[in-house]
Every structure is written in structure tokens, then in C-alpha cells.
Amino acid sequence: MTGKGDGAVVRAAGGVLWRHGPDGAEVAVVHRPRYDDWSLPKGHVEPDENCVVGGLREVVEETGFSARFVRRIGQVSYDVPRRGRHGPGGATARKRVSYWSALAGSGEFAPNEETDELRWLSVKAGTALLTYPMDKRILRAFGKQPDSTATMLIVRHAKAGRKQGYQGDDLARPLDGNGRAQAEALVDLLSAFGPGRLLSAPPVRCTQTLEPLAAETGLPLALEPTVSETAYARDPVAAHRRIREIARAGEESGTVPVVCSQGGVIPELTAWWAGADGVRLPPARNRKASVWVLTTSGGRLLTMDHIDSPLPLHANT
């Protein structure tokens, strides 16, 4: 599509909804009557919504199935007409759609305004049915990803003000107002991955980061001293061994562990794990309240994705 782009970006997100079938993964492909096309479930992200949260909402709304995200698949971009500027020479915006692997839970499809038919198909058959090449590319990428649903989340604690300005034991330094807002936003973001176990380094700013999620889910919040900055500096090998143990325990129990740690630990820990298991480490600023999404098998790292912030895009600073 051609047009006079002005740098505007339209955010959208969705997922490849899938379930275990007798011959491998079965994926959901939906028909949209408005366009008479077959596509993957997706939609616009609201201005006050995190892209991951919006993507899961769209998957659930368009298919009727509950789901949890497992790992990132990729992103596609294309031009769309700006609202009110249709026709030859009309201005365009760049639409960016992020896709995640979404493991289906319970539910049932019911025809609605957005989608009037859903088919569960193999990756090969689903790719053939999809209307658009970009959707086909996403589904092929999904088919090439490791066949694992074991997910682990590593969270950097939310904002807690400046260490230099705090009077008292730094271990007791609490979240500030911005940090509390980040911790609340983390509830929806982390919930998109179906958390089942919560662990935190001992500093108060770490435990407070996961307390809203613990309150929302009813999960106990356990201390994990090995992932504190002090313990990591003293014995990083113990932390490396422990993080693999946590991953394996999650795989065996079918639960998703969430580990909250600190800025002096996470960059080195993720770099070590990526290097040890031959996984590409994506670019990351490791900002406060950022999240690493890892998939593992037997405690071995398979994929790594990074979410820069739990807040909506316009709220990030």
C-alpha cells in the first residue's frame, strides 16, 4: 500500500492459539466476515493497555478460549490508511502487530461480529488456509519453535527511588509511587503467562514488586536468597545452579515460576544462561519492572524474550 506516511504507528497484537493434538500442535485460524479472510486472532491495543495484555485479550475475545502466552513469535509491519484519510494519496500509518504463542485452555468458540468461524488445523494446513503472506510467515515461525510449553519469568524489581536518598538499611528500601504503579501493572502482564509459583530476592523492593500479583492470584510469595545481589556477588555458580532447579521444578509440576531479582544480577544471569545453552540474547535495557520470558526443557534454556515495561507504551519514560 502506498501513501504519505507521517510516522504514525498503530499498535496491534495477537497470537497463535494452539492446543495439543493427536498428531502434534493444532492451531486456531479464524474467518473475519468483514474482510472475508482467514487470519490469526489479533486486534488493536488500547492506548491505556500494555501490548502483551492487549494481545491476549484479543485472542480470547476472537476465539472464546482462555489462554496463556508461552513465548514471542515475531512482529509484522505494514501500512494502513489513517482514519478519515482514505482514497488516493491519503495519509497512511504504520501498523505493527506482535504475535505470541498462546496455549489454549478451556472455552468454546461462538460466532461474533469479529469472527464467524474458527478451525483447528495442523500448522501446515493452517498456513495454507491463511489469506495473507505475513500471517503465513508467523505461523511457519511458530512451527519452527521448540516444542516446549515450560515458561519461566524473571522480573527486575520496580522503582524504589534513589539509594543515596534513603535513610536506613537499603534492604528495607520500599517502592516509590512509580514503583507501586509498575507493580500493579505487572499483575496483568505476568498473569498473561499463567504464573503458578512466586519467588523473590529478600530486599523489600523485590518482595513488594510481586505482592500485588500474590494478592491477586492467592499464590504464596517465597524468598529466594540466591538471586539477591549480595548472594550473587558471593557465589554466582550457586545462583546458576538454583535457577536451573527452579526451571526444572516448573517443568515437572506444570507451573510457571516467577522470580524477582535485582539489576546487579539479571543482566549477568541471563547472559550466562544464554551463553551456556547457546541461545541468542536479545537486546535489553533491563529497566526497572522489565520482564524476561524464558522457555526451558530439562532446565536447559530454549528461548529468551524481553518485555521492556509492564506499562502502556505512552506511559513509559
Image (tube, rainbow, N blue to C red):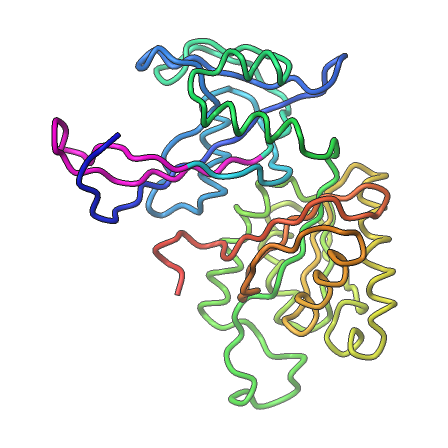
Is 180 within the magenta? no
Residue located 48% across and 23% down the image: 40
The image shows a total of numbered marks equal to: 0
Give how far across and how far down residue 183 sits, in percent. 53, 59
Compare residues 263 and 178 and report the one nearer the observer. Answer: 263
Is 95 within the magenta? yes
Give how far across and how far down residue 288 sits, in percent. 54, 66
Compare residues 294 and 48 and report the one nearer the observer. Answer: 294
Q: Which image quarter is the C terminus in?
A: bottom left
Give how far across and how far down residue 106 sits, in percent. 63, 21
Instruction: Tell me the magenta residue range.
Output: 77-100
Please state if 198 lies on the left or on the right of 175 as rendered.
right
Vertical placement of residue 73 versus 202, above or below:
above
Compare residues 3 and 266 and report the one nearer the observer. Answer: 3
Please state if 74 lies on the left or on the right of 266 as rendered.
left
Residue located 66% across and 70% down the image: 262
The quarter of the displayed image where residue 256 is located? top right
Q: Which image quarter is the N terminus in?
A: top left
Please state if 46 lies on the left or on the right of 206 as rendered.
left
> In the current view of this chain or complex, which residue is farthest to the front?
2
Residue located 82% across and 47% down the image: 300
The quarter of the displayed image where residue 155 is located? bottom right
Give how far across and how far down residue 218 sits, in percent. 67, 46
